[in-house]
Amino acid sequence: MHDDHHHDHDHHHDHDHSELSPMDARVRALETILVEKGYVDPAALDVLIETYETKVGPHNGARVVAKAWADPAYHARLLKDATSAIGELGYVGRQGEHMVAVENTPGTHNMVVCTLCSCYPWPVLGLPPVWYKSAPYRAKAVRDPRGVLADFGVTLPAGKEIKVWDSTAEVRYLVLPERPAGTEGWDEARLATLVTRDSMIGTGLASTPEATA
Ligand code: FE
């Protein structure tokens, strides 16, 4: 059996590229070249990818939001010093060094954008979705936030104020969505199932018990 692997590790690739998208195939080909040339250690790559696929992601932010909904003292700490309150749950690290939580209320809806590039709170939301980095979102979120919400299928009451927060290299925002009705008595784990990524960016709302039933 011919084995052209130069590395003694348990990193397995599917060498059949026929079912990959062109972009996936290009990424796979690039990774193969970088590994063969010795530029990257595939084990290190796996750790990085796994970290951002499974350990870091919107489920972290969902835990923060659910705890804030369920625990008034935590809610107060989150609004006073989000970096520290988020750190209590172990979510620290790059792009989360200075967090600010902005709370949706019956009178105010918050939406987050980075008009300059793609600043995003990695420790609580993971890597940004493609649309977040797109020029149309970055421009329209500021100019026409209600239009952006419509694009995302969200209609707010006409009288509700929309605040748009422009992320910077210094400050990253997390939207604390409104707690859905009908969730009285739910524990944090159950509440967290209603917290969508987009609800923490402000392009969506938390799910409702009816929608997730
Ligand atoms: Fe940015």
Image (cartoon, helix red, strand yellow):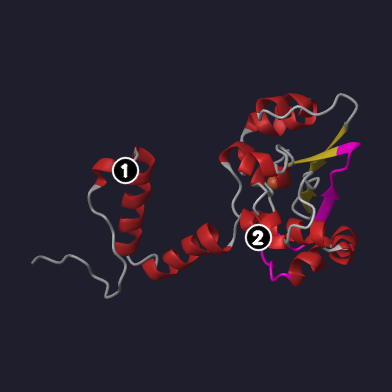
Observer-nearest of 160 and 70:
70
Image spot of residue 171 (x, y percent): 79, 54
Marks 2 and 1: which is nearer the front?
2
Q: Is residue 121 left or right of residue 21?
A: right
The amino acid marked with disc number 2 is Asn
Mark 2 or mark 1: whose residue is earlier in sequence: 1
Q: Residues within 10 Å of mark 2 (few under 14, many from 20)?
A: many
Q: In which quarter of the image is the C terminus?
A: top right
| Residue 102 is covered by the magenta coloring | yes
Please state the extent of the stretch shown in magenta in the rendering.
89-108
Q: How many marks?
A: 2
Q: Which residue is drawn at 84% across and 61% down?
A: 78
Q: Is mark 1 on a helix, strand or loop?
A: loop
Q: Is residue 131 left or right of residue 97?
A: left
Q: Residue at x 38, y 41 (%)?
A: 23
Main SS type for the magenta part?
A: loop
**Which label is found at residue 60?**
2
**Which label is found at residue 20?**
1
Quarter of the rendering containing residue 35? bottom left
The amino acid marked with disc number 1 is Leu
Q: Is residue 33 left or right of residue 151?
A: left
| Residue 161 is covered by the magenta coloring | no
Q: Distance between the residues labelled 2 and 1?
A: 30 Å
